[in-house]
Image (cartoon, grey):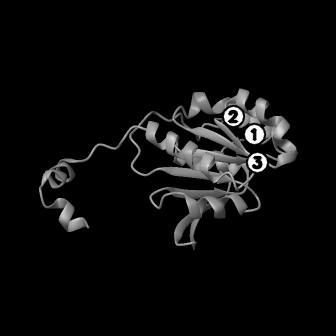
């Protein structure tokens, strides 16, 4: 699997390409994937799985700068990215063609990636699928990039629930010094 970085709107994006450890015909994880254990998260991450790039562009402009954005083009690439970032917020684009794949991914996430949460991005015509994807495990359904307030709030709620990374000894001493704020400003 290869990852390449690109810059857009002042942010670094990582686009993941390559093979996925799932066999598309069986929908079962291969031996290459492992179940993630709840570990502290050093940097909040969101994985956006869509073909058009519209949602990624909008989210990239409106999320805090400390959120790393990973953009994938398919469900298989999304699952590979999730294996590398098991506590990420996942944004899946829902289309008529990938409904079954989205439901499969939603069904397996709680067991394999207990810290990950999924929001579903769809068009207004797919709004009737909202109860179905929520029942399958999605924490939100957004039908328009204009609903930034709801999307941002969902992301903030997810990142606030993640275990914080413990500072090492040097970082904790530096943070306790009275002039540490003056040198970082």
Report how far apart the C-alphas of labels 1 and 3 lie in the structure.
Answer: 16 Å
Report how far apart the C-alphas of labels 3 and 2 lie in the structure.
Answer: 18 Å
Which of label 3 and label 2 is nearer to you?
3
Q: Is residue 1 visible?
A: no
Report how far apart the C-alphas of labels 1 and 2 lie in the structure.
Answer: 6 Å
Badge number at residue 112: none
Badge 2 marks a residue whose secondary structure is helix
Q: Tell me whether the residue at label 1 lies in contact with that at label 2, contact meaning CB atoms closer than 8 angstroms.
A: yes
- Mark 3 and mark 2 lie on one chain; the one further toward the N terminus is 2
Which of label 1 and label 3 is nearer to you?
3
Badge number at residue 102: 1
Picture mark count? 3
The answer to which of 4 and 134 lies nearer the viewer is 134
The answer to which of 29 and 82 lies nearer the viewer is 82
Q: Residue at x 45, y 36 (%)?
A: 161
Badge 3 marks a residue whose secondary structure is loop
Q: Tell me whether the residue at label 3 lies in contact with that at label 2, contact meaning CB atoms closer than 8 angstroms.
A: no
Give how far across and how far down residue 73 sits, in percent: 72, 57
User: Quarter holding the C terminus?
Assistant: bottom left
Give how far across and how far down residue 27 sits, in percent: 75, 35
Give how far across and how far down residue 36 sits, in percent: 50, 36
The answer to which of 32 and 132 lies nearer the viewer is 132
Quick one: label 1, few (<14), some, or many (20+) residues within 10 Å? many
Give how far across and how far down residue 48 sits, in percent: 64, 53
User: Quarter holding the N terminus?
Assistant: bottom right
**165 left or right, relative to 114:** left
Q: What residue sits right under mark 3 in the picture?
A: 143
Q: Residue at x 69, y 34 (%)?
A: 106
Q: Residue furthest left?
A: 178
For residue 179, what is the image quadrant? bottom left
| Residue 133 against residue 185 in the figure, above or below | above
Q: What residue sits right under mark 2 in the picture?
A: 106
């Amino acid at each position: 699997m290869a990852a390449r970085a690109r810059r857009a709107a002042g942010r670094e994006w990582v686009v993941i390409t390559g093979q996925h450890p799932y066999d598309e015909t069986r929908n079962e994880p291969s031996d290459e994937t492992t179940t993630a254990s709840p570990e502290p998260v050093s940097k909040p991450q969101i994985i956006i799985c869509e073909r058009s790039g519209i949602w990624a562009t909008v989210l990239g402009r409106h999320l805090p700068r400390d959120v790393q954005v990973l953009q994938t083009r398919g469900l298989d690439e999304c699952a590979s990215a999730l294996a590398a970032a098991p506590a990420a917020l996942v944004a899946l684009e829902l289309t008529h063609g990938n409904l079954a794949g989205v439901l499969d991914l939603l069904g397996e996430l709680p067991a394999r990636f207990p810290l990950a949460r999924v929001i579903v991005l769809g068009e207004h015509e797919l709004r009737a699928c909202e109860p179905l994807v929520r029942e399958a495990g999605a924490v939100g359904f957004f039908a328009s990039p204009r609903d930034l307030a709801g999307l941002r709030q969902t992301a903030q709620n997810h990142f606030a629930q993640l275990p914080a990374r413990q500072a090492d000894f040097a970082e904790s001493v530096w943070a306790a010094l009275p002039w540490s704020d003056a040198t970082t400003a």
